[in-house]
Amino acid sequence: MKNLKTETMQKIFFTLLTVFLLSACGGQKSVVKKYYMIEQPGAKIEPSEKTGEAIDAWCEVSEVELYPAFEGRKIVFRDASHQIRYFGNHEWAVRPAKVLTPVIKDYLSAHKIFTRVSTRFWERSPDYQLNTTIFNLEVGNAEGKKDIFEAHLKLRFELIDTQTDTIAVWHTADRQSVLEDRNLNQLAATISKMFHEELENFATKTKEVLVKPKNN
C-alpha cells in the first residue's frame, strides 16, 4: 500500500513538473535576430546624361578598409566619446567592406569615370588605385537627446597614381544625420545614402582633376 502511494505521488509530481515546464516554454517569446543591408540606392547606379567622356585609364578598386571596431557584422552604438557597444540581435547582413567594395566598382563603371574599372587586373597594371578608408560607421544618440538616434559616417577616398606613387585625388567626409525614429532599418538606409553622396562627390572631383580639356 505504501509503494502504491509513493508511485502515485511520483506520477503527480512528474505530471505537475511537465505542465510547469511546458507553461514556461510557451510563455517565452523567441528572439528573432535581424539583419540589415548597406545597399546601392536605385537612382545612384544609373548614369546621368551628364556622365561625359571617361578618363582614359584603368582603375583598380582596393577592398574598403574599416577601422577594427567597425569591420565586423556587429552594428556599433556609440555611448560616449571613447565608449561603444554592439547590438545583440541586430547585425549587418554582410561585412560592410564586402558590400561597399563592389558598390564602388559598379558606380565608377556605370558612370564611366574610367575606361576600365575592376577589383583586380591580371593582364596589366592599373593606372590608378582607389583606396577607401572608413573611420566611423555607427549610430548613437543625437547631442543632448537620448531618445533620438543619429547615424555617423566618416571616410576618406584616395586615388593613387601608380606611376608616381602619389595621391592624384583625395576626398574626405565626416557626416552625421538624425534618424526619424529609433529604427536600425533607417540607419542602414541613411548610411547607404551618405556613402553614395560622398562617392558621387569624389567621382565628380576626380573628373574635374583628371579630365584634360580638349584643344579647340
Image: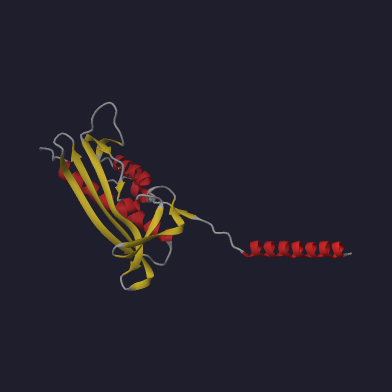
Q: Residue at x 29, y 28 (%)?
A: 122
**As rendered, which of 66 and 108 lies closer to the eye?**
66
Residue 15: horizontal and vertical position, in percent? 76, 63
Q: How many marks?
A: 0
Q: Is residue 153 left or right of residue 87?
A: left
Residue 107: image quadrant is: top left
Work out which quarter of the rendered image holds the C terminus and state it: top left
Q: Residue furthest right?
A: 1
Work out which quarter of the rendered image holds the N terminus and state it: bottom right
In the image, residue 177 above or below residue 97: below
Q: Residue furthest front?
A: 2
Residue 50: horizontal and vertical position, in percent? 25, 46
Q: Residue furthest top?
A: 123
In the image, residue 105 above or below residue 35: above
**As rendered, which of 97 and 194 lies closer to the eye?**
97
In the image, residue 104 above or below residue 2: above
Does residue 152 appear anywhere in the picture?
A: yes
Does residue 50 appear anywhere in the picture?
A: no
Q: Is residue 141 left or right of residue 128?
A: right
**As rendered, which of 95 and 10 lies closer to the eye?**
10
Q: Residue at x 13, y 36 (%)?
A: 164
Residue 115: horizontal and vertical position, in percent? 25, 35
Q: Residue at x 28, y 26 (%)?
A: 123
Residue 125: image quadrant is: top left
In the image, residue 159 above or below residue 30: above
Q: Residue furthest left?
A: 216
Residue 116: horizontal and vertical position, in percent? 27, 34
For the rendered model, the colour scheme is: secondary structure
